[in-house]
Image (cartoon, grey):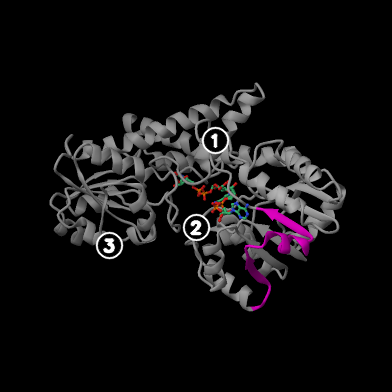
Amino acid sequence: MKIAIAGAGYVGLVTGACLADFGHDVVCIDKDEGRIAALRRGEIPIFEPDLAGLVATNLGAGRLSFTTDLAGAVAGAEVVFIAVGTPSRRGDGHADLSYVYAVAREVALSVSGFTVVATKSTVPVGTGDEVARIIAAANPEADVAVVSNPEFLREGAAIEDFKRPDRIVVGIEDERARVVMTEVYRPLYLNQAPLVFTGRRTAEMIKYAANAFLAMKITFINEMADLCEAAGADVQQVARGMGLDNRIGSKFLHAGPGFGGSCFPKDTQALVRIGEDFGSPMRLVETTIAINEQRKRAMARRVIAACGGEVRGKVIGVLGLTFKPNTDDMREAPSIDIVRGLLDKGARVVAYDPQGMVAARELIEGLEFGESAYDVAEGADALVLVTEWNEFRSLDLARLKDAMAAPVLVDLRNVYRHDEVARHGFAYTSIGRPA
Ligand code: NAD
Ligand code: UGA
């Protein structure tokens, strides 16, 4: 099939590379000329495991190409995916749909023959109706079926998630789109992934419901972690004991410094606004957001407490800055609040992250950088593990302790065990686990 994808960011690029890998003929479009020029040279603008190889293979095979010419790409396509950003609108937390609508207007003028326009961007309920209206207004001759096809991939595991999804959700209002979208995803449902067809508004709602539920699940276990600390219980064992119940499930029950990233924070905000618009408040989601914001700030206080209540003039080493491992994405990363909280109290903060330091340099004024975990430990009064990159899982604790001015380890991801850290003479603080 001939497929065009507008927006060559995380989602557009992964979708393009994977669909090309399934044998489709895919062209990815972006308005960012530098990004497209780099992609044509085989350079990947984001860090995502295995993506560079997949892009190179499919570029080489002639199934994947990159352009800034949306009109040319759309003219030959049977399906056009919209995968542009929907960030929080400044000031009110609604999803900013201006990029989606701009693409819809351009697409309307270029389609030829029956075309499915599928929105992969995360958009509020009713956006598909507006996209259809925009296209009809811009080009009354256009023969288009507007579909909602939300994406559920996670950064850092994007290719695996795309190729082996738990389900594919497709919201349609025109039966012709069912045939086309079934063909797009044929290689996936042959792998047993359920293709769930719903109405368009329902598909749009599923995406926000899923993200908000996962954010609530994380926030629940984070609050349980605080209670476990106060009451002398172990949150990891509580999570295991809960998660083995199939009705609950074990995933997304890892307590930590609070959720971050390009999606949970903005999507929970947007869902609250959607609820308000419809006079149907999303109170659990509102509370989730508030708890998570407080939690990120509370993590800096936890570090200060581990340092004896004072960090002025002290050196704090930070391991991991990105919002999760295996990505270079710093958007809404908990590390931002933690580092700022420590800098505000007069600490010197030195951080190391395998992929996040370029973006962090722009985001966090006053933060210094090291070249490795051991480099950051040199002369530090405390080390704080913020992101659970694999390379932080088996650090040489004896070497770290020798390098540090004081052996204080604050492990916000519960990577280490009390006994092994204590054996090396560290004062150890983790999340929701008794000493
Ligand atoms: P992104 O910011 O990485 O990429 C968006 C791209 O769209 C940018 O490269 C931008 O230049 C391009 N763009 C903007 N306007 C354009 C236009 N008119 N024509 C062509 N290109 C244009 O965004 P992302 O992280 O890929 O997210 C895209 C959407 O997918 C969002 O709605 C997001 O909520 C959703 N989503 C993201 C993820 C994720 O893990 N990042 C997962 C699921 C869903
Ligand atoms: C999330 C969803 O998992 C995807 O299904 C969805 O497609 C995507 O948002 C989106 O809409 O963009 P992502 O943000 O890439 O994916 O990463 P997650 O693995 O969900 O992690 C999000 C945050 O929650 C991270 O800060 C992570 O550290 C935190 N988290 C996650 C926990 O603190 N505990 C957990 O048990 C799981």
Amino acid type at circle 2 is Gly
Residue 268's disc number:
1
Q: Residue at x 86, y 58 (%)?
A: 113
Q: Which residues are magenta?
A: 61-82
Residue occupied by mark 3 = 372
Name which of mark 1 and mark 2 comes first in the sequence: 2
Q: Disc 1 to disc 3, how far (Cα)?
A: 35 Å
Quadrant in the picture for residue 94: top right
Q: Quadrant of the N terminus?
A: bottom right
Magenta span contains residue 76: yes
Dot 3: within a 10 Å radius of its alpha carbon, few (fewer than 14), some, or many (20 or more) residues? some
Looking at the picture, which amino acid does disc 1 mark? Answer: Thr
* Residue 224 visible, this orientation: no
Q: Earlier in the sequence, mark 1 or mark 3?
A: 1
Q: Amino acid at mark 3?
A: Ser
- Is ligand 2 closer than 8 angstroms to the Cβ of mark 2? yes
122 lies above or below 294 = below
- Asked which secondary structure carries label 3, the reply is loop
